[in-house]
C-alpha cells in the first residue's frame, strides 16, 4: 500500500498542477503505468464501477475497495471545483509481500531488542555478582585475621557503598588493634623501670657462687642460693616483659619484611628502642642523657636481639657503676665501611680498661661479663670493642661494627675508634 500511495501521489500532483494530457500521461508512466485517471466528466474503464468512482468524487475521501485479485485505491483530486479520481490497483501478491516484509522487519527488531536487553542485563548482573563475590571474599579474609585486605568498590550503587563501608570498617579494625597493642606495650614498658631497678639491686648483692660450699656454713649457703633464685627470677621476668613488648608492637607488614633479614638489623632503631627503655630509669635517677646520630637508618650484620643485649650490657654498667645523677651520652656514626656505637658517661671511669675487657674480671665486684657480651657481639659482626677516657670525664665504650651497606676498607680500627671517640659534645642534654 505504501507503493500505491506514492504512485497515486505522483499522478495527483500532476493533476493539481494543471498538467495537459501529455504531462498527465508522463505522470502515469512514472507511476508505473498502472494508474487510471477518471476525469470529472466522461467515463473511463477501470477495475471499479462508475458508481464507486462517483461516490469517491462526491465524498472527497480516499477509499480502498476490494476487487478480484487485489485492492483498488481511489483518491479524489479537486481542481477549480472539478474533481478527478486517481485509481491505483494493488495486486494481492504485493499486499502479502509488504506484510511479510513488515513482519520480518518487526521480528528482526524484536529479536534485536531482546538480544540487547539480554546483553545489558548480563553485564549488569555480572558486575553485581563480581562485586558481591569480592565483598564476600574480603569479609572471609578479614574474618581469618588478614586485616590488610581492601576492595575496589564497584557494581550497583548499593554494593559500591557496601564496599566503601567495608574498607572503613577494616581501617578501624586495624587502628583499634594497633591501639590495643600499643596500650599493652605501654603498660608492659612501665614495668621496666621497677624491674630494672630490682635487677640492679639484685646484682649489687653478694656473689651467689656455691661451688666452694665446703667453706660456708648452711646459713650462708641458703643465703647465696636465695640470691641466685632472685636473680634468676628477675632475668626470667625481664625476658617475659621484653617478649610481651616485642610481640605487641610487631607491625603486620613492616616487621614481616624485617624478619626475613636474619642476622641484619638497623643499629639506629635498636639504639632508639633501648633508649626508650633506659630513659625511664634515667628520669628516676635524675640522669641527663643525649642520643646522637640515631635518626638515620644504619644496617649492621648483627642480629637485633644480640645488638640490643650488647647495648643493654654497656648501659647497664653506666647505671650500675656511676652515681645517680651522672650524665651519659649514646652516639652512632658510620665511616669508611664501619659503624661505631659509642656510650660515654661522666662517671669515675675505668681504672684498668684491659682487665675490664677480660671475661670474668672486674674491679667493681660484679661478674665482669657485661663488656664481654658487647665484645662477642661486635666480633661476630667483624668488629671490636674498645675502652677509652670520655670527653665527659668518665668511660667511653665504643662498639665497632661492619657497615652492611658498604665494603669495609683496610684501615686502622684503633685510629678510627680514636677519631669517633673525639666526635662528641661534652654538654649533656635530652635525647635528640
Image (cartoon, rainbow, N blue to C red):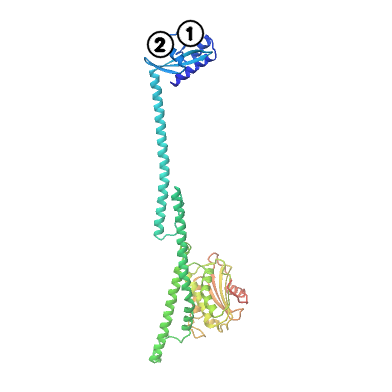
For the N terminus, give its image quadrant: top left
On screen, residue 47 versus residue 266, left or right, reads left
Q: Secondary structure at mark 1?
A: loop
**Which one is nearer the viewer's eye here, 427 or 408?**
427
- Residue 81 in sight here: yes
User: Residue 371: where, in percent of width, then height?
Assistant: 51, 78
Query: Outermost residue toward the left?
Result: 68
Mark 1 to mark 2 CA distance (whole Å)? 15 Å
The residue depicted at 42 percent of the width and 55 percent of the height is: 138
Classify 10 Å Cα crowding around label 1: few (below 14), some (14-19), many (20 and above): few
Quarter assignment of residue 103: top left
Q: Which residue is mark 2?
A: 49
Q: Residues within 10 Å of mark 2 (few under 14, many from 20)?
A: few
From the viewer's side, name the closer residue of 122 and 201. 122
Please report the residue visible at 40 percent of the width from the left and 11 percent of the height from the top.
Answer: 49
Q: Tell me the residue that label 1 is attached to.
A: 41
The one of 137 and 357 positioned closer to us in this rendering: 137
Residue 213 drawn at (x, y percent): 39, 89
Work out whether 133 lies above or below 283.
Answer: above
Residue positioned most to the top: 42
Amino acid at each position: 500500500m505504501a507503493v500505491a500511495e506514492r504512485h497515486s501521489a505522483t499522478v495527483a500532483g500532476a493533476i493539481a498542477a494543471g498538467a495537459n494530457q501529455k504531462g498527465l500521461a508522463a505522470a502515469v508512466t512514472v507511476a508505473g503505468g498502472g494508474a487510471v485517471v477518471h476525469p470529472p466528466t466522461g467515463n473511463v474503464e477501470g477495475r471499479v464501477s462508475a458508481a464507486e468512482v462517483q461516490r469517491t468524487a462526491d465524498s472527497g475521501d480516499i477509499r480502498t475497495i476490494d476487487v478480484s485479485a487485489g485492492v483498488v485505491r481511489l483518491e479524489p483530486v479537486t481542481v477549480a471545483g472539478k474533481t478527478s479520481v486517481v485509481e491505483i490497483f494493488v495486486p494481492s501478491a504485493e499486499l502479502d509481500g509488504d506484510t511479510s516484509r513488515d513482519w520480518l522487519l518487526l521480528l528482526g527488531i524484536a529479536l534485536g531488542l531482546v538480544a540487547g536487553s539480554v546483553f545489558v542485563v548480563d553485564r549488569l548482573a555480572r558486575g553485581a555478582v563480581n562485586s558481591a563475590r569480592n565483598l564476600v571474599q574480603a569479609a572471609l579474609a578479614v574474618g581469618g585475621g588478614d586485616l590488610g585486605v581492601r576492595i575496589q568498590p564497584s557494581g550497583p550503587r548499593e554494593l559500591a557503598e557496601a564496599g566503601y563501608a567495608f574498607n572503613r570498617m577494616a581501617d578501624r579494625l586495624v587502628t583499634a588493634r594497633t591501639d590495643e597493642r600499643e596500650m599493652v606495650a605501654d603498660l608492659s614498658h612501665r614495668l621496666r623501670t621497677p624491674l630494672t631497678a630490682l635487677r640492679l639491686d639484685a646484682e649489687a648483692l653478694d656473689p651467689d657462687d656455691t661451688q666452694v660450699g665446703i667453706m660456708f656454713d648452711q646459713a650462708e649457703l641458703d643465703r647465696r642460693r636465695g640470691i641466685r633464685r632472685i636473680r634468676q627470677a628477675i632475668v626470667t621476668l625481664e625476658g617475659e616483659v621484653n617478649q610481651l613488648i616485642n610481640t605487641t608492637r610487631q607491625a603486620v607488614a613492616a616487621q614481616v619484611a624485617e624478619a626475613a633479614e636474619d642476622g641484619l638489623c638497623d643499629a639506629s632503631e635498636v639504639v632508639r628502642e633501648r633508649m626508650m627503655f633506659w630513659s625511664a630509669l634515667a628520669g628516676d635517677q635524675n640522669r641527663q642523657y643525649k642520643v646522637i646520630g640515631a635518626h638515620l637508618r644504619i644496617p649492621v650484620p648483627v642480629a637485633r636481639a644480640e645488638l640490643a643485649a650488647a647495648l643493654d650490657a654497656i648501659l647497664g654498667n653506666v647505671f650500675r657503676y656511676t652515681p645517680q645523677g651522672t650524665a651519659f651520652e649514646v652516639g652512632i656514626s658510620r665511616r669508611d665501611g664501619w659503624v661505631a656505637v659509642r656510650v660515654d658517661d661522666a662517671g669515675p671511669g675505668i681504672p684498668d680498661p684491659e682487665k675490664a675487657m677480660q671475661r670474668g674480671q672486674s674491679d667493681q665486684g660484679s661478674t665482669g661479663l657485661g663488656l664481654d657480651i658487647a665484645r662477642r657481639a661486635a666480633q661476630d659482626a667483624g668488629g671490636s670493642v674498645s675502652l677509652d677516657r670520655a670527653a665527659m670525664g668518665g668511660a667511653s665504650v665504643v662498639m665497632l661494627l661492619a657497615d652492611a651497606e658498604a665494603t669495609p676498607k683496610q684501615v686502622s680500627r684503633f685510629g678510627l675508634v680514636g677519631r669517633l671517640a673525639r666526635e662528641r659534645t661534652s654538654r649533656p642534654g635530652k635525647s635528640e
